[in-house]
Amino acid sequence: MKGLVLVAGKGTRLRPITHTLPKHMIPLVGKPMMQYSIEHLIKAGVRDIGIVVGYLRDKIMEYFGDGSMFGANFEYIIQEPQRGIAHAISVSREYIGDEPFVVYLGDNILREGISKFKKEFEASDYDALILLAYTRDPTRFGVAKFKDGKVVRLVEKPKKPPSNYALVGVYFFREIVFEAIKHLKPSWRGELEITDTIQWLIDHGYMVKHHIINGWWKDTGKPRDLLEALYLLLDTIEENINGEIDENAEVFGRVHIGAGTRIHGDTIIRGPVYIGRNCEIGPGTFIGPYTSIENNVRISGGEILSSLIMNNAYIELGDDTRIIDSIIGTNAVVKRNKSRKRGTRLILGETSIVEL
């Protein structure tokens, strides 16, 4: 079985961060978000993986290379222009050949992985296997309608959802899916929709099996979704201290501190917190629960809670300044300028400079 990881999109809803960085390369707890999908594929035994790229593709290709460092074989497939998930599958036709394959959207994260679903699909005669998850806001997704325990219809972003069960961004297919895509017409969004693809299979009598997943699932399309995915991932980390902690600094709970990082005096770290390599935290700093600080970050003063701080950021805060629910981009600079007590919420792109 081959795999396809789809990472061609521009991530416009995550601007300004995605002006200079592909959405799928945003780091979450020490690795680019798309690496989670790749690791799930490899853990399931899928070693031949096509990565469908488009926007800022050089940054993805340079980081992941040929896949050898992951024990896999990567091939890059260019999708230009980006016209939807089904279109991304169609441009991968030559790479897939006649093998069964699994599609994994690079901005989706599943806690439980895909190993058991891959085994079931390989042992079955299903033409497609789709995963569904309960969501409180089905209007944002492709949504399933059920009859007698089977999926009979899929509706893309419905105004009146037929259920609360949305398509998860993982799909298993056999070769017939390429025939289905040939019959599609662009939707109102100008895209070839995956919901229409699966609907064609259902309407023409092909066997489409579904599973409702038990663990959490996050689509990271918007800043709030990205932070929620971060919080879920931080719930899974274990204590791992490789850096240096000054005698009068305090570290509580599940905290990861990378090699070369120093936690200066009069600093409190309260987990779950991830801190990467070669960081300087403190003095006089509070890092609160559900915060991920990537590599080469310098933070002094103030409080940071429930936030993502990306590589090489520099943050200098006053004692009464608090940053909450924020995303601070690569190389961003945040400096204290004026004394005022309030929580500050920020979404900053690469090389941003902010004075508070």
Image (spheres, rainbow, N blue to C red):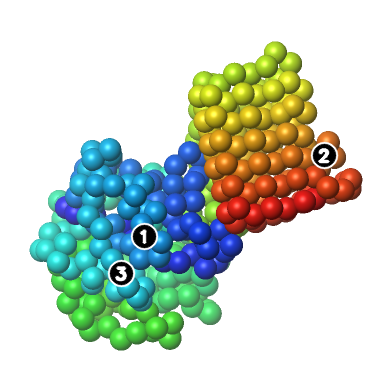
Q: Residue at x 77, y 51 (%)?
A: 355
Q: Which residue is mark 2?
A: 318
Against 320, residue 161 (above or below) is: below
Q: Which residue is mark 3?
A: 79
Q: Quadrant of residue 208?
A: bottom left
Q: Which residue is mark 1?
A: 57
Q: Residue at x 74, y 16 (%)?
A: 248
**Residue toward you, 51 or 225:** 51
Residue 122 placement (x, y as % from top left)? 16, 52
Residue 170 placement (x, y as % from top left)? 33, 58
Q: Quadrant of residue 75?
A: bottom left
**In front: label 3 or label 1:** 1
Instruction: Tell me the CA gap for discs 3 and 1.
Output: 10 Å
Identity, as a three-letter code, of the amino acid under mark 1: Arg
Q: Residue at x 66, y 51 (%)?
A: 326
Q: Quadrant of residue 339?
A: top right
The numbered mark, 3 or 1, whose residue comes first in the sequence reads 1
